[in-house]
C-alpha cells in the first residue's frame, strides 16, 4: 500500500503502483444508505464527500461504490438506466469528479460497480428493443425468444429467476425476454458486438474520470448458450458440467474479460477489477482472477461459513493456494449488501452455518433468504433468539482474524460499527425484489441496507435531515458513530486500531500455521513475525509468547497469558 495514514487534513499523493490492490482494505459504500447531504432521505455523493475524513480516519485503502447510476431502483440500483451518468437523486457527474478528487487526496482509491449481465428495462436500448419488431437489430442486444405453446403463450422454458418467479417476461407483441434477476433487469446478449463495444466505452469513461477499478456484478452470467432446443430447468441441473452450464460460468466468458484487460492496461497504473462470480468450484472461480482477465475474484467462502475454526482453516488454506496459483491475491468478505450481517449470523442461538439454516430457521422462527441460489439465515424472529452480545463478540474475533490474513479485505459499510441486521422492517417498507418476487416468503436484503447511524439522535440518526428511506431501529443510537467514537472499547475503535496496525504490519502474502493442539484455536504467523490467534471455543486457551498489540474482545486489558473464548489477539515478537 502506497499511502500512509496521515493527519486527516493533509493531502496525500497516491503513488502509481500496479499492485496497490493486492493487500488493500476496501470499504463498500451502498450510496443510498451511507449519508444524505441534500435531505431527501436518500444517500448521495455529497454525503460521501463530507465523510471522506471519516473514511480516512477509519484507515481504508479504497472505497467500492455500489451502483449510483440512474435507476428506478427495482433492484437497489443494480438495474441501470444509463451506465455513464449519475442518478440525479444521488448527484451529478461534476460531484462524482469532486468525490474522486477528495478520496484520492485522502489517499483512498475508488472502485465502482459495473453491471454487465443486464440493464434496466428503462435503458434506452431496451426501450428501442420494445419498440422494434421481432428479429430486429434492436432486439438482438437482448435475449428475445418466441414462446412455447400453440400461440407462444408459454415462456420458452420453465427457468426461474434468481429472485424467484419466471425468468422470462412477455412483451406486447408476444415475444419473451430473458431476465436472470428481476423482470426489470433484461439480460444483455453478449454475442452482440454493439454490447461488447458499449461496455468498453463505459470502462474507459470511468477510467478517464480517475476511477481505479471495477467490481464486476454477476461476472459469471454474461455468456449463455441458447442454442435450440432449450433444456428444462431439471434437465439443466441433471446434466450440469462445470464450464458447460447453459447460463453460468461458461469458458467463453473469459474472452470478454481478456478484452477488458486490454482496456485496463492502457492506464497507469492499470485499472483493476474484482469479479463477483458464483461457480461450482473454487478452481473455476480462480479463472476470473487471472492476470489476463479481471485480476481478482471474490471468495465468499468465509461469509458462507459458520463461526468454526475447522471451516476457517480449510477455507483460508484453499484460497491462499488458489490465489498463488492464479497469480492474484485472495479476497476476504464477511458482510456485504446481499447477506445478513455477520454479527447476526454468528449470534443466532440455533446455529449460524448455512447447512444449519433450515433447522435454525424452524427453531428461531427466522426466515431463510436465498440469493444466488444460496441460503442465508435472516433474523426475523423474537429478539430472545438472537444473542446480540455473543454475535458481536464473535464478529469482532472473525474480523480481526480476517484483517490479519494475506490478501485484500472487503468491508461493508456499518460493519465497523458492529451493526446487527435490522429485522424490524414492516412489509410495506421493504424494497428488495427478492421479498416481492417471493411473496414475502423470503424477507430479502433490506435489513443490511438500512441507512447508517452517524449520531445518537436527531433526524435519522444523522444520516440526513429528511428521515431515511428504510426505517432505522431505536437501538441505532448506541451503535452510532458518535456513540462509538467516544468509547475506546467500541467496535469502531477496534476497526480503526486494526486498520492502522494492518498498514504498519504489512507483510508478504503468505502465512504459516502454528499448531495449537486444539481444534477450536487457530494460530498463524506472517513472514514478518506478525501473529494472529483466535479462540473459536468458549474455554480459555493458553496465549503464546509475544507482545499483544490488539485484542478483539471489548474491555480486555490484561490477558495474563490466557486467550479468552471467542477472541482474537494479534501478537508481534517481543523486544
Ligand atoms: C448483486 C446484487 C444484485 C444482483 C443483480 C448481485 O450480484 O450483488 O445486489 O441484486 O447481482 O444485479
Image (tube, rainbow, N blue to C red):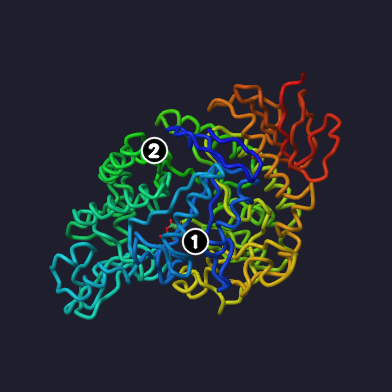
Q: Give how far across and how far down residue 301 sits, in percent.
A: 52, 44
For residue 157, the mark is none
Q: Quadrant of the C terminus?
A: top right
Considering only vertical position in the picture, is 192 above or below 410?
Answer: below
User: Which of the four quarters of the rendered structure image does ligand 1 lie in?
Assistant: bottom left
| Residue at screen point 34% across, 60% down | 83
* Quadrant in the picture for the N terminus: top right
Of the numbered discs 1 and 2, the one sitting upstream in the chain is 2
Residue 238 in percent (x, y) is at: 32, 53
Judged from the image, the secondary structure of the residue bearing numbered disc 1 is: strand
Q: Residue at x 59, y 58 (%)?
A: 50
For disc 1, the marked residue is: 370
Give the percent coordinates (x, y) of residue 263: 29, 42
Q: Regarding mark 2 in the picture, which secondary structure is present there?
A: strand
Which residue is identified by label 2?
A: 295
Q: CA distance from mark 1 to mark 2?
A: 28 Å
Whether residue 506 is visible here, answered yes or no, is: yes
Work out whether residue 348 or residue 486 is closer to the camera in this orientation and state it: 486
Q: Is residue 149 left or right of residue 277?
A: left
Q: Is mark 2 within 8 Å of ligand 1?
A: no
At a point 61% along the width and 76% down the height, the residue shown is 426
Location of residue 166 with respect to 61 vertically, above or below: below
Q: Please tell me which residue lies in front, 173 or 112.
A: 112
Callout 2 crowding tier (Cα within 10 Å): few <14, some 14–19, many ≥20: many
Q: How many marks?
A: 2
Residue 278 visible in image: no
Amino acid at each position: 500500500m502506497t499511502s500512509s495514514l496521515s493527519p486527516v487534513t493533509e493531502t496525500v499523493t497516491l503513488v502509481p503502483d500496479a499492485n496497490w490492490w493486492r493487500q488493500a482494505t476496501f470499504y463498500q459504500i451502498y450510496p443510498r444508505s451511507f449519508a444524505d447531504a441534500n435531505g431527501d432521505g436518500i444517500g448521495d455523493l455529497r454525503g460521501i464527500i463530507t465523510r471522506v475524513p471519516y473514511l480516512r480516519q477509519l484507515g481504508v485503502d479504497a472505497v467500492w461504490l455500489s451502483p449510483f447510476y440512474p435507476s428506478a431502483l427495482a433492484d437497489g440500483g443494480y438495474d441501470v438506466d444509463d451506465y455513464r451518468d449519475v442518478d440525479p437523486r444521488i448527484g451529478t457527474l461534476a460531484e462524482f469528479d469532486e468525490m474522486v478528487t477528495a478520496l484520492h487526496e485522502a489517499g483512498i482509491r475508488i472502485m465502482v460497480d459495473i453491471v454487465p449481465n443486464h440493464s434496466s428495462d428503462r435503458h434506452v436500448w431496451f426501450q428501442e428493443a420494445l419498440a422494434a419488431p421481432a428479429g430486429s437489430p434492436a432486439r438482438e442486444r437482448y435475449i428475445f425468444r418466441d414462446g412455447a405453446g400453440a400461440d407462444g403463450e408459454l415462456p420458452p422454458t420453465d427457468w426461474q429467476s434468481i429472485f424467484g418467479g419466471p425468468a422470462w417476461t412477455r412483451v406486447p407483441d408476444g415475444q419473451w425476454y430473458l431476465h436472470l434477476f428481476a423482470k426489470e433487469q433484461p439480460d444483455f446478449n453478449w454475442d452482440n458486438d454493439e454490447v461488447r463495444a458499449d461496455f468498453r466505452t463505459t470502462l474507459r469513461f470511468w477510467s478517464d474520470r480517475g476511477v481505479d477499478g471495477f467490481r464486476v456484478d454477476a461476472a459469471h452470467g454474461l455468456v449463455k448458450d441458447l442454442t435450440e432446443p432449450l433444456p428444462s430447468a431439471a434437465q439443466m441441473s441433471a446434466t450440469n458440467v462445470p464450464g458447460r452450464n447453459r447460463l453460468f460460468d461458461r469458458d467463453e466468458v473469459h474472452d470478454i474479460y481478456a478484452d477488458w484487460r486490454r482496456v485496463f492496461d492502457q492506464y497507469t497504473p492499470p485499472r483493476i477489477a474484482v469479479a463477483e462470480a458464483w461457480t461450482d468450484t473454487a478452481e473455476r472461480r480462480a479463472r476470473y482472477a487471472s492476470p489476463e482477465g479481471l485480476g481478482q475474484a471474490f471468495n465468499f467462502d468465509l461469509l458462507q461459513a459458520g463461526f468454526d475454526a475447522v471451516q476457517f482453516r480449510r477455507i483460508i488454506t484453499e484460497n491462499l493456494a488458489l490465489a498463488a496459483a492464479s497469480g492474484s491475491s485472495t479476497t476476504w468478505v464477511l458482510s456485504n449488501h446481499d447477506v445478513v450481517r455477520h454479527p447476526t449470523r454468528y449470534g443466532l442461538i440455533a446455529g449460524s452455518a448455512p447447512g444449519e439454516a433450515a433447522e435454525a430457521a424452524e427453531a428461531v422462527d427466522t426466515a431463510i433468504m436465498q440469493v444466488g441460489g444460496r441460503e442465508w439465515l435472516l433474523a426475523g424472529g423474537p429478539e430472545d433468539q438472537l444473542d446480540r452480545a455473543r454475535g458481536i463478540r464473535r464478529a469482532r474475533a472473525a474480523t480481526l482474524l480476517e484483517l490479519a490474513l494475506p490478501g485484500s479485505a472487503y468491508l461493508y459499510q456499518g460493519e465497523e460499527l458492529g451493526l446487527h441486521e435490522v429485522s424490524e422492517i414492516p412489509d410495506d417498507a421493504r424494497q428488495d425484489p427478492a421479498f416481492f418476487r417471493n411473496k414475502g416468503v423470503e424477507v430479502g436484503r433490506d435489513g443490511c441496507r438500512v441507512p447508517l447511524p452517524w449520531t445518537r439522535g436527531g433526524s435519522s440518526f444523522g444520516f440526513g435531515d429528511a428521515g431515511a428511506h428504510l426505517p432505522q431501529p431505536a437501538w441505532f443510537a448506541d451503535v452510532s458513530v458518535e456513540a462509538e467514537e467516544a468509547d475506546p472499547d467500541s467496535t469502531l475503535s477496534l476497526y480503526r486500531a486494526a486498520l492502522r496496525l494492518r498498514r504498519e504490519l504489512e507483510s508478504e502474502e503468505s502465512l504459516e500455521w502454528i499448531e495449537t493442539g486444539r481444534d477450536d484455536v487457530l494460530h498463524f504467523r506472517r513472514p514478518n513475525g506478525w501473529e494472529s490467534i483466535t479462540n473459536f471455543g468458549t474455554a480459555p486457551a493458553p496465549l503464546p509468547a509475544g507482545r499483544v498489540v490488539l485484542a478483539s474482545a471489548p474491555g480486555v486489558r490484561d490477558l495474563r497469558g490466557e486467550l479468552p473464548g471467542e477472541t482474537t489477539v494479534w501478537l508481534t515478537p517481543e523486544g
